[in-house]
Image (tube, grey):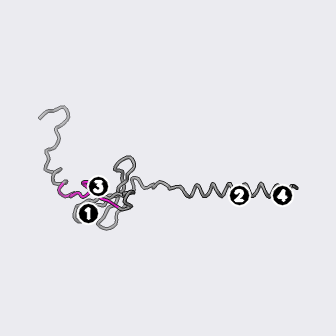
Amino acid sequence: MNSKDFAIGVLCTTATILLVGLLILHSQAQPAGAAGVGVQAGDYVMAVGSIGDRTEALYVIDTAVNGMNSYYFDFKSNAFGVPPGGQVDLGRLRAMAQSAAPPAAPGRRP
């Protein structure tokens, strides 16, 4: 075996190792980096947030009708779902907040 054959063998082995490493890196799922991102388009405001430790939700607010829907992706059924309480009437919540008594000043009791 001469030095040319040895060098070709080393280069082929190195190229194979690098190719396998590249394939492994690109085959792994990359995490979504959209936490805390929001966007507004027309009458809609969309934002992402987390529901639990491993589940993220998409919140869609319709400013024209004061409503909010939330959606999450269910990996078991491979479809989008609406969590319990996923549809909220923001107009009703705003009215309830405005009709509530203001909080007492610090240090005073009603």
**Whole-percent x and y of residue 81?**
32, 59
Q: Please state which amino acid type lies under the numbered disc 2.
A: Ala
Tell me if 8 is positioned left or right of 86 in this view: right
For marks 2 and 1, give the one nearer the viewer: 2
**Whole-percent x and y of residue 56?**
37, 53
Q: Please state which amino acid type lies under the numbered disc 3.
A: Pro
Query: Which quadrant is home to the N terminus?
Result: bottom right
Tell me if 22 is positioned left or right of 45 in this view: right
For marks 3 and 4, give the one nearer the viewer: 4
Q: CA distance from mark 2 to mark 3?
A: 49 Å
Name the residue that disc number 1 marks: 63
Q: Is residue 55 magenta?
A: no
**Whole-percent x and y of residue 31?**
47, 54
Q: Looking at this view, is 80 or 65 the one in front? A: 80
Name the residue that disc number 4 marks: 5
Q: Are marks 2 and 3 in contact (CB under 8 Å)?
A: no
Secondary structure, mark 2, is: helix
Q: CA distance from mark 3 to mark 4?
A: 63 Å
Identify the mark nearer the N-term, 2 or 3.
2
Name the residue that disc number 3 marks: 83
Q: CA distance from mark 1 to mark 4?
A: 71 Å
Name the residue that disc number 2 marks: 15
What residue is rendered at 71% in x and 57% in y? 15
Tell me if 93 is positioned left or right of 24 in this view: left
Query: Which quadrant is home to the C terminus?
Result: top left
**Whole-percent x and y of residue 32?**
45, 55
